[in-house]
Amino acid sequence: MVRRSFIRQTASLLGIAALHQSVAEAFPSMQSPTLGPDADFWRQIRLAYAASPTLINLNNGGVSPAPRAVLEAQEHYSHLCNEAPSYYMWRILDQDREPLRYNLAAIAGVDPEEIAINRNATEALNSVIFGLPLQAGDEVVLSKYDYPNMINAWKQREKRDGIKLLWVDLQLPSENEEEMVSAFTTQFSSKTKLVHVTHIINWCGQILPVRKIAEAAHQVGIEVLVDGAHSFALLDFKIPDLGADYFGTSLHKWLSAPIGSGMLWINKDKIGKIWPLLSNDQPQSNNIRKFETLGTRNFPIEMAIGYAVDFYQMIGAQRKEERLHFLKNYWMDKVSNVPGIQFFTSKKPKYGCAIGCFGIEGKKPGDISETLFRDWKIHTVGIEWEKIKGVRITPNVYTTTEDLDKLVSAIKQLT
C-alpha cells in the first residue's frame, strides 16, 4: 500500500508533465527549439528530483541523485526495518528481492535467474574477475581506459595466479569501429581466455562497439566480460544485444537507484563455473543467488530500487537516451568555437551519449574544474588519464538547458 502511495504521488506529478506534453503537441508553436524536444515534460522531471537550486551538478557520471519517490521509499523502509530489524529484514523484505529481480531482468531483457543484486559495478565485476577459473599463463585482454577498480582487480589476479594481461591502447575519441575492434582482436591469441570491455568509457563517454568485439572473441572461443556501469539505463539496449557472457553495472548511476546498489548478470550456462566473491554453501551451483550472500545487507536500499525502475520505465529508454544525447551536444555545440578547446567525446549518438569531456590548451583540467565551481558553482570533475586531459561534463534528465547555458558562458570566460 505504501508503494502504491509513493507511485500515485509521482504519477500525479508526472501527469502534469503528460498534460504539458499533449498541449505542446497540439500547439507546436509553444515548443521551444532552444530547450529541446518535450521541454515542458523535462521541466516536470526536474521537479521529481531534489536537485539543488544553488549548485549545478554536472558530475552525474560519478553517481546520480535519486528521484524524490525513491528517497521516500528508502526512508520508509529504513523506518520499517528499525521497528523490528530481524523480523522485517529477514522474514518480510528478504522475500521481496524476487519481484525486484524479475523487474530488473525485464528492463535488461534477460532471464531473472541470471540476475544477482549487489552494491555496485565493482562488486559485480569483481565477482567474475576473481571467480573465473583461470590458471597461470592464461591471457586476459583489457584496455588502459578501463575503470581503475577493474584494472587493479586484474592486476591482483596477475600477481596472485600468474595470468598474463594484454593491454589495449585506444585513440580517443574515435568514430572508427574497425579500428576500435582491431585494437582488441590483434591482442587475441590461443592463450586468451577472456576480453574485458568497458561499454562506455567513464573518462570521456566513448561508446565502444561491444557487439562486434564480442562476436570476434567468440569466433575464437574467448569469453567476454562487459563493464556496463555507465551504459545500463542510459543507452537503449538489452544485455543480450551485446553478445557478452558476463555483465556488471551500478544502479546508482543512470537508473537513479539509491547510492550503493548494483547488478550482476551472468549467462545461465556460465553461472556454475564462477566462484562467488563471498562464501556460499554451494559455491559451484547454478543458482545466481550464490552471488548475493552478503551477510547483513541494506534492505531499504534494495527495496527502493524498484521505485527507480518504475521511474525509468515511465520516462522510457529511447526518450531518455535521446534527451541525454541532446544535452551533451547542446553545450558542446555552443562552445565549439572557443579558442584552444578540444573535445574527447564524439557528438554522434553511436559513439557518445550524456558524458562529454573537453580541454582547453594551456590549462590544467583540475584548475578548470576548480574555477567552474568557485566562480559559477558548477560541479564537474577534472580528468587526467592516459591521453585524456580534460573536464568531464555529465548532465542528467533533471538538467535544464539553462544550467548548460551557464556552463557555456563560464567556458567562454575561461579563455
Image (cartoon, rainbow, N blue to C red):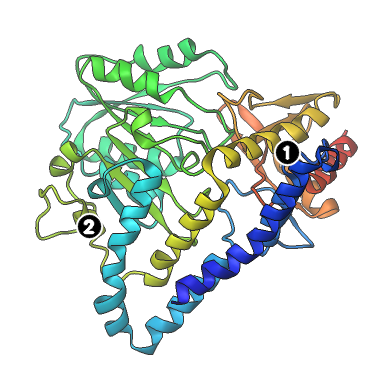
Q: In the displayed structure, would residue 76 be above or below residue 126?
A: below
Q: Which residue is mark 1?
A: 37
Quadrant holding the C terminus: top right
Instruction: Name the secondary structure under disc 1.
Output: loop
Q: Nearer the viewer, residue 303 or 390?
A: 303
| x and y percentages locating residue 183 in the rendered image | 43, 15
Q: In the visual, does 126 lie left or right of 386? A: left
- Quarter of the image holding residue 14? bottom right
| x and y percentages locating residue 296 in the rendered image | 29, 72
Q: In the displayed structure, would residue 136 be above or below residue 309?
A: above
Q: Residue at x 61, y 29 (%)?
A: 388
Q: Which mark is residue 90?
A: none
Q: Which residue is mark 2?
A: 278
Q: Is disc 2 surrounded by few (<14), some (14 to 19) or many (20+) residues within 10 Å?
A: some
Q: Is disc 1 surrounded by few (<14), some (14 to 19) or many (20+) residues within 10 Å?
A: some
The answer to whether marks 1 and 2 mark residues whose Cβ atoms lie closer than 8 Å is: no
Q: Amino acid at mark 1?
A: Pro
Instruction: Name the secondary structure under disc 2.
Output: loop
